[in-house]
Image (cartoon, rainbow, N blue to C red):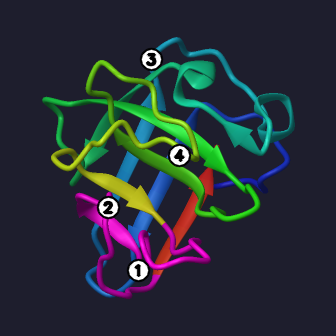
Amino acid sequence: PWPSLMGHFEEVLYVNESSGEMAWFSRNSGVRTTIAAAGYNAAGFLLGEWTGHGVARTDTTYQLNICDDAWMWVGLMVSGYTGCWKQCCHRCSDTSTDYYRTDGDTGSSYNGVSFAENGHHNVSDKTMSVGIR
């Protein structure tokens, strides 16, 4: 089972409800954390490297951001690690790796829901569920 957002976690699950595809990510350090401990504007380096499973690319190292900032509230966002740790307000100009994120931009730059596609720009709307354990 996937517990609530307030519990300790070391895995993040994304389900594309339209296609039934699933991607999940496990924290490489194996250390469990909480969203409250990481913060609601957490840069990738705070949560380290993650490994993809399911439809996520297995030849990519991922990072997790938690973004609930004034203009960006995509929640839990996983994207490829390119040698640059992303922050909610800085995406390292990453236009090549897959992103997993919800729509949360008040502007016009990161609209739509990204699932197994580059999300450094607008993408289509889709229904996605996100869970942690």
Label 4 Cα crowd, 10 Å radius (few <14 / some 14-19 / many 20+):
many
| Residue at the spot of label 2 | 119
Q: In this picture, which residue range is highlighted in magenta? A: 102-127
The label shown at residue 38 is none
* Residue where numbered disc 1 is placed: 112
N-term-proximal mark, 4 vs 3: 4
Q: Is residue 122 left or right of residue 75?
A: left
Callout in the foreground (4, 2):
2
Asked whether residue 49 is drawn in magenta, I would say: no
Secondary element at tag 4 = strand
Q: CA distance from mark 4 to mark 3?
A: 12 Å
Q: Nearer the N terminus, badge 2 or badge 3?
A: 3
Q: Quadrant of the N terminus?
A: bottom right
Q: Quadrant location of residue 118?
A: bottom left
Q: Are marks 2 and 1 in contact (CB under 8 Å)?
A: yes
Q: Can residue 13 be spotted in the picture?
A: yes
Q: CA distance from mark 2 to mark 1?
A: 9 Å
For the stretch drawn in magenta, the main secondary structure is loop
User: Residue 50: horizontal and vertical position, in percent?
Assistant: 41, 27
